[in-house]
Each structure stands twice: as structure tokens, then as C-alpha cells.
Image (spheres, grey):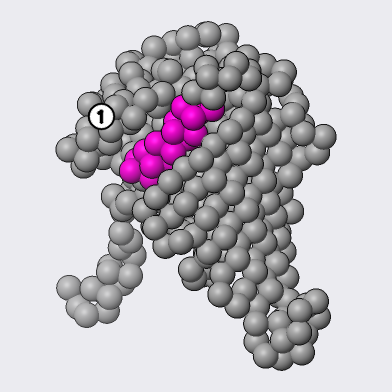
């Protein structure tokens, strides 16, 4: 074969495309349907099936996403590389454990489990088997949250408000696990320091569980975070404000906006002399699609996920501490 023929032959050779990551969604409820739809739109992903004990729900979502319906999650073992677990929290441990013990990577919705012992066991199973365990703290993938990280240096005071109009959904759990845990996770990521103390209070107003809660978290660096979450507000609000040396940073999660006021020594539009205002607004993104894309990429490349099991454990540990303090006040004072 002459050189030109060899060149022609090699020019036609292409590396084989990587096989698609085979995924399934366990849970065909409100959020599970969104997981299925997003997976269905991702390149390099094959949506193998939708699982739900309510077979009609599984069949409806599977039909919508051109996939298959299953009533038992165990039937997917050997057919998938990874799963999203989007079922009520008390079921997380058993289902995730079944998949991890059979070599399947797992994305588990927040909160990862009902107890710290369960969370630790899942982390250990994943670690011992070299598997991906990602926790679904969706707000981490908000474009404003992702962009603000590089502006945060050493925050000394943080204030967050996550307020929601009453919707009657998720009232079977405390607002701490429903809403506050998002901000707990984000603030832990921003501060990156051990916790010295937690003080919490809350009240049940319209449900059998805490509907409004506040937590004050003190870090070893001296930073203090004041976190409020409510599902009985007259408005929707998702904001966090950070104060650090020579700077104030505000993040509006809903509007995807960052306001950064910093000391530059120059005349600016800020109300404080010598400080300038930098405002950034990000186009509407798809945080869930970004989260699932990151999970699939971690599965394909075997790199550590954005929100690890350890991070999910830490957020759960603080959330349970907050709930315990509120429950203790209830028992002592009969407030709720």
C-alpha cells in the first residue's frame, strides 16, 4: 500500500463514540417527571425506564418520554449505569442502597435520608465500591450561585431568606427539610469552615410540622449566618446577602442577579463614598438540566460530583440539629 493510500485510510478512521450512559428515574411524581424529561433531552444519555409503584403514573411518564415503565426498581439492576431517586425521603435509603450494592451510580434528591446513620451508610457503600453518589441540592446549579463563588473571599456575616407562598405541598415535612436545607448547603459551600454553634427557633402555623424557621449558625472563622425559611409568606423570595471585608454581595436566586458593592477608592454610584456597584444578571437557565448533565458527566468520567454525599450529609446534619432544637422548644413550652 502506498503512502497516499495509507493517508486516505487513516483519514477515514474515527474514534468510536462512547456508549450512552443508561439511566432510569425512580419515582414518577411531580419532580420525577421533570427528571425524566430532562434526561430525555440530554445528549449521550439513554433513558431506560421510569419506576413507580403506581403503575399508571410510571406508564404515563414513560410514554411521554418514549421509555419503559417498571413497578419494581430491582428490575433495573443490570440494565442501567445510573439512577435518579425521586421518591419520598423515607424510601431513599433502601432504594439507593439496592442500587449502590449492585454497582449503579446514584443521584438522590435532598434530603438524602431521614437519619444521619442512613446517610453515612450510603456514603460508605458508594466509597467502598468506587461509585458516584450525588445529592440533589438544585440551587447549586443556579447560574447566579455558580458565578458568585469567585467573588466570595472570607464572608463575616450572611443573611438569607427563602420565603414561599403557601401551596399545600410538602407539608408532610418540616420547612427546614423542605426549604431551609437549600440555603444551609449553599452557605456551607460559601464559608467552607467548621461550625461552632447553632441556635434555632420555629413554629407550626398551618400544618402539623414547622412552617417557619430561623437558624443562626456560627463558624470557626467568626462568620455568622442568619437563615430564615417560610412556606406561609405573602410573597416568594429567595435571596442571600454576604458581607466581607470591603464588600457587600447580594444574590437574588429567582431573578438570577448578583449585586456586588465593593470598596475601590473610586467615585461610584454606591451610596457609600469610595465604593462601586457591579450588577450582573444572568439569562434564565435550566438548573435541573445542568444538575443532571453534571451527574451524567461524573458518571461518564468517574470524577467527583459537584454535590457529594459528604456535602449532603453535612447539610442534613445541620438541618436535623435545627429541627431538634425547634422540637425541644415545642416540648418545653408547648408552643406548637
Q: Which residues are drawn in magenta?
A: 309-327
Q: Position of residue 38 (x, y in %)?
A: 56, 38
* Residue 318 falls inside the magenta stretch: yes
Q: Image quadrant for the C terminus?
A: top right
Q: Image quadrant for the N terminus?
A: bottom left
* Residue 64 visible in the snapshot: no
Point 32% across, 51% down: residue? 304
Classify 53 as above or below 90.
Answer: above
Residue closer to the observer: 122 or 304: 122
Q: Position of residue 98 (x, y in %)?
A: 28, 21
* Residue 32 falls inside the magenta stretch: no
Task: Give the image quarter of residue 311.
Answer: top left
Q: Quick check: 85 left or right of 251? A: left
Q: Position of residue 238 (x, y in %)?
A: 69, 46
Task: Give the image quarter of residue 48.
Answer: top left
Task: Give the image quarter of residue 228.
Answer: top right
Residue closer to the observer: 258 or 184: 184
Q: Position of residue 157 (x, y in %)?
A: 57, 60
Read off the residue under disc 1.
121
Classify 223 as above or below 174.
Answer: below
Point 28% across, 68% down: residue? 9
Amino acid at each position: 500500500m502506498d503512502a497516499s493510500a495509507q493517508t486516505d485510510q487513516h483519514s477515514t478512521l474515527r474514534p468510536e463514540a462512547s456508549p450512552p450512559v443508561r439511566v432510569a428515574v425512580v419515582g414518577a411524581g411531580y419532580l420525577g417527571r421533570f427528571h425524566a424529561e430532562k434526561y430525555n433531552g440530554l445528549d449521550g444519555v439513554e433513558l431506560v425506564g421510569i419506576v413507580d409503584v403506581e403503575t399508571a403514573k410510571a406508564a404515563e411518564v414513560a410514554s411521554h418520554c418514549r421509555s419503559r415503565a417498571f413497578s419494581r426498581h430491582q428490575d433495573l439492576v443490570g440494565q442501567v449505569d445510573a439512577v435518579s431517586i425521586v421518591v419520598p425521603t423515607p424510601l431513599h435509603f433502601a432504594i439507593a442502597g439496592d442500587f449502590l450494592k449492585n454497582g449503579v451510580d446514584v443521584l438522590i434528591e435532598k434530603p438524602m435520608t431521614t437519619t444521619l446513620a442512613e446517610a453515612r451508610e450510603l456514603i460508605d457503600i458508594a466509597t467502598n465500591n468506587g461509585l458516584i453518589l450525588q445529592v440533589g441540592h438544585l440551587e447549586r446549579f443556579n447560574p447566579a450561585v455558580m458565578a458568585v463563588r469567585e467573588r466570595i473571599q472570607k464572608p463575616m456575616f450572611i443573611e438569607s431568606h427563602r420565603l414561599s407562598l403557601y401551596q399545600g405541598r410538602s407539608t408532610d415535612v418540616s420547612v427546614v427539610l423542605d426549604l431551609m436545607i437549600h440555603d444551609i448547603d449553599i452557605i456551607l459551600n460559601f464559608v467552607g469552615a467548621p461550625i461552632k454553634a447553632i441556635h434555632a427557633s420555629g413554629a407550626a402555623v398551618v400544618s402539623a410540622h414547622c412552617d417557619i424557621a430561623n437558624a443562626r449558625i456560627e463558624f470557626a472563622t467568626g462568620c455568622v449566618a442568619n437563615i430564615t425559611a417560610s412556606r406561609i409568606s405573602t410573597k416568594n423570595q429567595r435571596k442571600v446577602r454576604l458581607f466581607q471585608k470591603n464588600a457587600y454581595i447580594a444574590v437574588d436566586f429567582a431573578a438570577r442577579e448578583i449585586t456586588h458593592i465593593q470598596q475601590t477608592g473610586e467615585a461610584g454610584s454606591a451610596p457609600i463614598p469610595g465604593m462601586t456597584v457591579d450588577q450582573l444578571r444572568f439569562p434564565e437557565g435550566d438548573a435541573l438540566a445542568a444538575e443532571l448533565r453534571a451527574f451524567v458527566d461524573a458518571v461518564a468520567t468517574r470524577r467527583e460530583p459537584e454535590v457529594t454525599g459528604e456535602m449532603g450529609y453535612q447539610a442534613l446534619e445541620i438541618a436535623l440539629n435545627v429541627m431538634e432544637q425547634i422540637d425541644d422548644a415545642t416540648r418545653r413550652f408547648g408552643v406548637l
